Image: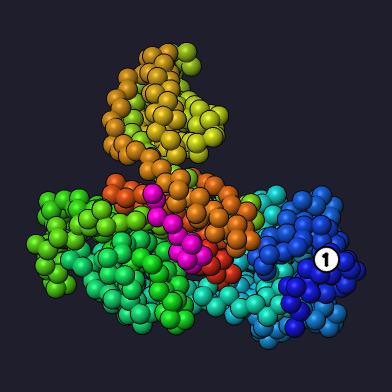
Amino acid sequence: MTTLEQLNSSAARDVPAFVKTLHGIYEHSPWIPERATRLGPFANITALKQALQGVVTAADRAEQLGLIRAHPELAGKAAIAGELTAESTGEQAKAGLNLCTPEEFATLQKLNADYNAKFGFPFILAVKGATGKGLTRQQIIATFTRRLRNQPEDELREALRQIGRIAEMRLNDLLGHTPAIGATIMEWAEEIGAWSDDEGALTCTYMTDAHRRTADQIAHWMREAGMHAHIDAVGNVVGRYLSTDPQAKTLMTGSHYDTVRNGGKYDGREGILLPIAIVKHLHEKGETLPFHFEIIAFSEEEGVRFKSTFLGSNAIIGQFDLNLLNLTDRDGVSMRDVLTQAGHDVTAIPKIARDPSDLLGYVEVHIEQGPVLLNRDLPVGIVTSIAGSSRYLVDLKGVASHAGTTPMNMRKDAAAAAAEIILYVEQRCGEDQHASLVGTVGQLQVPNGSTNVIPGACTLSLDIRAARDDVRDNAVADVLKKIEEICQRRSVDFKIEKTVSAPAAPCAGWLMQQLAAAAERAGVKPFELASGAGHDAMTIAKMTDVAMLFTRCGNGGISHNPLETMTADDAEVSAQILLDFLRNFKAKV
Ligand SMILES: [Zn+2]
């Protein structure tokens, strides 16, 4: 077994020995470990992984292509002829690629040929997958088929990331490193990810059978980890890991266990399962914390069943609107009935409210749900602020007239006005990037439109978000002014209705600093990013200081989708950071 100490000492004194030890990590590419020696010594395996992959990212295009082309085809000719490196042979066999049926083999050969023709390099996939246990042949073929549709530039970067993931698992083997806490988090997410309102997809909406079963399981895991756990009147699962000091205050963490329709396994759930796994680890070592540590699995954040979001966290901050109990789902069943039938006492909801003076703060871990960390080769990032959002519905009225007889300069085309508005939103929100400003027109309709009629009406939605309220407000003001100007010039009438206005929730600097310090100690350069999506932390921020740690989201950063993914190693790094944060936590003075 190689140790990190040996590697560090050879990196400093005997570069050829270092390169030799790491020769199997990247296929036929000794230049990678060689250049990484300059970045040592490595405080831990994560720092080493980051350094090696940093060399790959910084390499020029020819070197990157050379690295990619040094890899064998999946189940390709070299595999059959037994010409693969020992590492590749083992990995391909683990995925069962040596046991392909004739049909699967033919499919893979066709995919290999199409892929090579399109991209000019072999398809690379870390076939051991997100947990290291191996993808199935069906999963491999599905991923292959999906990635064949990628743009060449995106696919080149994806190939390099897969090489990074392969190297990561080979390094784990070389150094005898097991991401044990990460593996537990992944297993638990898999287990509750199978319980769904819909067959064949993960849908876990408020107070359904799957939702209640999930809550019971979370409570069970909390108790097993040494926590006191109960399910409150809105279905939040609350676990407390008590300090030996009964007078101690409480540090809170958590996230939601409900999902969107056909959602991902980690959205929300990571932020529940990860701290439970940490507490389990502490409990097994007999270690307590100098404060009470409370994990809340929020029952509802996504707003799918009753079209009202953040039910769980609003109850915690004492702002659950009891009128919401009258809301009905699509079958006409009221929230009150749903809760009562599940055995909850709705009159107890106001009592859930926490006393802010008892709280030290709130830290939430969440999968990023976007591609920023993935594109920067970072396992985690520190959230600066949860973006506020402004949404509008815009109604444009022009004149519907004959597409053949109305000259171009005599038209009042509502859709053409909309097109101009959309392009302006894109341009305006693209020019002010320092506060993660984004603008989207996600809905666009030409009511009763037909091929031979100039659009007389057009409706569009507008969604503008930013990490800072002033940045968002300025963009909104400019867009609204531009809509007026465009409509005036085109003699189109307009009506604008504001549908949402939510302020940004900035994270607390003192908590961010402590998270950043923990990330640094874990071997990850602290990187700050804003959250474009809303999270429970946004609600809790009304009661106490909050911070968030994002975990890298795989598959191009896709979320709210079954393809949402993360790795056991990234879950492990995130867990180690939160654990270190807890052990070193200093209350705000
Ligand atoms: Zn979420």
Residue 26: image location, x then y, percent: 79, 68
Q: Indicate left or right for 306 with 465 as reference.
A: left
Q: Quadrant of the N terminus?
A: bottom right
Q: In this picture, is 379 found above or below 141?
A: above
Residue 587 is one of the magenta-drawn residues: yes
Q: Indicate left or right for 121 with 505 as reference.
A: right
Residue 190 is one of the magenta-drawn residues: no
Residue found at the very far bottom of the displayed protein: 99
Q: In this picture, is 236 found above or below 531?
A: below
**Badge 1 amino acid:** Ala
Residue 115 in view (yes/no): no
Residue found at the very far left of the displayed protein: 347
Residue under the point 9% across and 62% down: 347
Residue in the foreground of this view, choosing between 2 and 246: 246
Residue 295: image location, x then y, percent: 34, 66
Residue in the foreground of this view, choosing between 100 and 270: 270
Residue under the point 76% across and 79% down: 2
Range of residues picked out in magenta: 578-589
- How packed is label 1: few (under 14 Cα within 10 Å), some, or many (20 or more)? many
Residue with the mark numbered 1: 11
Q: In this picture, is 187 found above or below 319?
A: below
Colour mapping: rainbow
Residue 236: image location, x then y, percent: 26, 66
Q: Indicate left or right for 75 with 197 as reference.
A: right
Residue under the point 70% across and 49% down: 153
